[in-house]
Image (cartoon, rainbow, N blue to C red):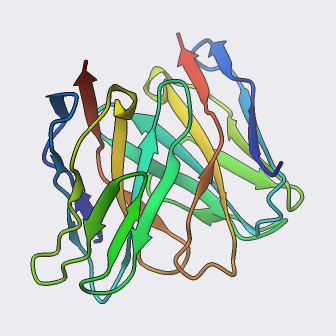
C-alpha cells in the first residue's frame, strides 16, 4: 500500500544551521505531497504541498521539491531558528480523501 | 474564526470503560477524520466521514466506532476501552473542493486507559 518514510527520528541543530529532513514515499501515479508542522501542545498545521514532478512548495523559509524519479520530497531550510523546534510530518494524498503520514521527525534547535 | 475544536482535552478512564471523544468544525468542510498519534507511528487514520450519516473505515479501526451526526460534529466512541488505546487523538477536517485534500487539525485529546 501507499506509505511515507522519514528516516530521521530526531534532528538536533544550532541556530543558523542548514536543515534537511528526508522524506521518501511509495505510491502509484502522482500523489499530492505535504509537509505539516506540529508545535508542542498543538495539532499538526499544514506547511505547504506540491502535486506534480519538479514542483517546489515553500512556506516560512522551508521548501521541498517533488521528485518522482527518486520518490522524494525532502524538507530544507537554509538557516533554522530556535522557534522552528517542532515535529515535522511528511504526508501523501492519493485521492479518495485519504492522507497517509510518515512517522515524524523531531527538530531541536539550540540557541 | 473557522476552527476544529476537540473535547475533552484530557480524559482518563479504566479498562472496559466507555469513552466518547467529540469534535466540532466550523470550516464548513465536508470531510472529517479521526487520527491517533503514537511515538514511532506518526498519525494513523481510524475513521473518516464525508458527510452527516456517513462513515468510512480507516487503517486502524479495531476497537473504535464513530458517528457523524451533522456536518459539524464527529464523534469517536470507545465502548470497551483497553490500555492499548492510550494515545493522543486528533480530529481533522478537509474541503471536498480541495482535490489535494489539505487537512486542518484540532488541538487533540489525550486519553489514558488505566
Q: Quadrant of residue A67?
A: bottom left
Instruction: Look at the image and tell me whether residue B61 can be seen.
Output: no
Instruction: Look at the image and tell me whether residue B51 can be seen.
Output: yes
Determine the residue located farthest toward the left in the rendered image. Answer: A70
Quadrant containing the C terminus of chain A in the rendered view: top left
Residue A66 in percent (x, y) is at 25, 76
Q: Where B55 falls versus B22 (above or below)?
A: below
Between B31 and A44, the one lying in front of the other is A44
Quadrant containing the N terminus of chain A in the rendered view: bottom left
Residue at point 30%, 70% (across, down): A2
Q: Quadrant of residue B72?
A: bottom right
Residue B32 in percent (x, y) is at 69, 59
Task: Describe residue B59's horizontal placement relative to residue B50 as left or right.
Answer: left
Residue at point 84%, 53% (across, down): B26
Q: Where A44 falls versus A75 (above or below)?
A: above
Task: Describe residue B40's horizontal placement relative to residue B23 as left or right.
Answer: left
Question: How many numbered dots are placed on residues in this image?
Answer: 0
Between A71 and A107, the one lying in front of the other is A107
Residue A84 in percent (x, y) is at 36, 34
Determine the residue located farthest toward the bottom in the rendered image. Answer: A29
Between B51 and A45, the one lying in front of the other is A45
Task: Describe residue A39's horizontal placement relative to residue A111 as left or right.
Answer: right
Residue B25 in percent (x, y) is at 80, 51
Residue at point 77%, 66% (across, down): B29
Residue at point 26%, 26% (across, down): A108
Task: Describe residue A42's horizontal placement relative to residue B53 as left or right.
Answer: left
Amino acid at each position: 500500500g501507499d506509505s511515507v518514510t522519514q528516516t530521521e527520528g530526531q534532528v538536533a541543530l544550532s541556530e543558523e544551521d542548514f536543515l534537511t529532513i528526508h522524506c521518501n514515499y511509495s505510491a502509484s501515479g502522482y500523489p499530492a505531497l505535504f509537509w505539516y508542522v506540529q508545535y508542542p501542545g498543538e495539532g499538526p498545521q499544514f506547511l505547504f504541498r506540491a502535486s506534480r514532478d519538479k514542483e517546489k512548495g515553500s512556506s516560512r523559509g522551508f521548501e521541498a521539491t517533488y521528485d518522482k524519479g527518486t520518490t522524494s520530497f525532502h524538507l530544507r531550510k537554509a538557516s533554522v531558528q530556535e522557534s522552528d523546534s517542532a515535529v515535522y510530518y511528511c504526508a501523501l494524498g492519493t485521492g479518495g480523501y485519504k492522507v497517509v503520514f510518515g512517522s515524524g521527525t523531531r527538530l531541536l534547535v539550540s540557541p | 474564526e473557522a476552527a476544529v475544536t476537540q473535547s475533552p482535552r484530557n480524559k482518563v478512564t479504566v479498562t472496559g470503560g466507555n469513552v466518547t471523544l467529540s469534535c466540532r468544525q466550523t470550516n464548513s468542510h465536508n470531510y472529517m477524520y479521526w487520527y491517533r498519534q503514537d511515538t514511532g507511528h506518526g498519525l494513523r487514520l481510524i475513521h473518516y466521514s464525508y458527510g452527516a450519516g456517513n462513515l468510512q473505515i480507516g487503517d486502524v479501526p479495531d476497537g473504535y466506532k464513530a458517528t457523524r451526526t451533522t456536518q459539524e460534529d464527529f464523534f469517536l466512541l470507545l465502548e470497551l476501552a483497553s490500555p492499548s488505546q492510550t494515545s493522543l487523538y486528533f480530529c481533522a477536517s478537509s474541503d471536498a473542493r480541495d482535490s489535494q485534500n489539505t487537512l486542518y487539525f484540532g488541538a487533540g485529546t489525550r486519553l489514558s486507559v488505566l
